Image (spheres, rainbow, N blue to C red):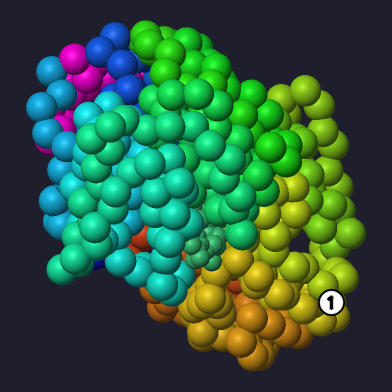
Amino acid sequence: MSAYIIEGGSKLYGSVRVHGAKNSALPILAACILTNGECVIDDCPPLRDVEGTVRILRRLGATTVRDGDTLAVKASALAKNDIPDSLMREMRSSVIFLGALTARYGSARLSYPGGCELGPRPIDLHLAGLRSLGAKIVESGGGIECSAPDGLRGCDISLSIPSVGATENIMLAATAAKGRTRIFNPAREPEIVDLQNFLTAMGAEVRGAGGSIIEIEGGKPLHGARHRVIPDRIVAATYMAAVASAGGAVSIENVRPADIASVSAVLREAGVDIRESQNRIEVASEGRLKSVRPIKTQGYPGFPTDAQSIIMSVMASAQGTTMFVENIFESRYRHAGELIRMGADIRVEGRVAVVSGVKRLYGANVSATDLRGGAGLVVAALGAEGETAVGDIEFIERGYCGLDESLAGLGAKISRR
Ligand code: EPZ
């Protein structure tokens, strides 16, 4: 396993460009199998999770051609409707292919995605949604057999949790369901709107994404389309947190400020100077930050769970105590133990973490526990005194392209071992 070696204490200056959003690219790549036409996806970063999805597309029989950050996908020769255990275990979010394969073939076979570092990752809402559309789903021996021999039929579906993945799976399946499907209490994340925009470009009739009801008029033939993936709002939040932790002044380019407004509000309250314009956020921070009012993770537009560990690293050396409440995932505080190794004072009780700011963190040997937990450790190391080795960075590379190069370009002392 590789590691980042970070010498803390260097302030960050300059500008950095945010790459396309992982959590938008993944469902969009699954949507590419809904047509035989060629789809061209711009700003589709070569992240580990994106390359994993490309491996699934190729195994299903699609052809893919990468040219820098542009990926062309053609699914005319698609020949399989099953995803093997090895690929499902590598990336549980591949469950997103369930809706797309059922839409295309009327059947799909996946192994259970299983849990991950964030705790059990149930898919009951995905399966209930597909059953409502008329799919027959048999779960046995760790596998899922989904079939719709008579095709799918549009209907009203209410989600008890605004699940991002379930919303996407239902949207993808509903494009092939005859008639109207309405999704009540859907996820409202910007990535859901991006998926709607791509499906619309393919000729689907989808509207309402980002709001309280998403409506899909299914059964339309879909064609290829070209689409630019929206900027990754969590990567943008990571750069903002890096400046908050290390100090300095950085211009973050290719970002939509509204997508990450809840994190900007918290950092402003902590004392970070944040100026927003059309597609840029300028961040400046000097001296010790202050603790903030309790941070409770919620679905969009609330404070994103994916930014929780990243902001916890900033609050660990702020003046005062900050309380976090993680309402989305069951166990998303595994990074706290690693921060404590760096001198942080954090008490975790179930969904609550109380972070009492210390004057400074100290470099230590730590390991990434998951994607955003690992990113949080990098943020902490940038502001810590001394050298930190962050191990298991393969987790981090699932969602960040060249994080070390980008930070080094801003003046951070970081190298990859
Ligand atoms: C997506 O995961 C993201 N992943 C996650 O980002 C993100 O943290 C999460 O949404 C929340 O915003 C991708 O988009 C690939 P959910 P997803 O379904 O779809 C429960 C990252 O760091 N639930 O909205 O799996 C579930 O257990 C990753 O980039 C059910 O109970 O999240 C969780 O507690 C990590 N039944 C809550 O809902 C279901 O059928 C929210 O999960 C589905 C979900």
Name the secondary structure under disc 1.
loop
Which quadrant is the N terminus positioned in?
Answer: bottom left
Tell whether circle 1 marks a residue whose Cβ is less than 8 angstroms from ligand 1.
no
Q: Nearer the viewer, residue 152 or 273?
A: 152
Which residue is depicted at the point 12% across and 33% down?
Answer: 80
Which residue is depicted at the point 87% across and 71% down?
Answer: 293
Which residue is depicted at the point 43% across and 32% down?
Answer: 153
Q: Is residue 114 above or below residue 81?
A: below
Q: Nearer the viewer, residue 25 or 164?
A: 164
Q: Nearer the viewer, residue 102 or 296?
A: 102
Which residue is depicted at the point 80% across and 56% down?
Answer: 267
The residue tagged 1 is 319
Q: Hey, which residue is sitting farthest front in the picture?
A: 150
Query: Residue 125, image x and y in percent?
Result: 48, 57
Name the kind of residue labelled 1 in the image: Gln
Q: In screen coordinates, is 188 left or right of 389?
A: right
Q: Nearer the viewer, residue 63 or 380?
A: 63
Query: Residue 315, image x and y in percent?
Result: 73, 71
- Snapshot quadrant of residue 65: top left
Is residue 34 something that shows in the picture? yes
- Snapshot quadrant of residue 182: top right
Give the residues drawn in magenta, as a range: 58-76
Q: In screen coordinates, is 75 left or right of 209?
A: left
Residue 79 included in the magenta stretch of the image? no
Query: Residue 371, image x and y in percent?
Result: 44, 59
Q: How many marks?
A: 1
Q: Is residue 183 above or below residue 103?
A: below
Is residue 398 something that shows in the picture? no
Query: Residue 226, image x and y in percent?
Result: 43, 11
Residue 67 included in the magenta stretch of the image? yes
Q: In screen coordinates, is 358 left or right of 308?
A: right
Which quadrant is the C terminus positioned in?
Answer: bottom left
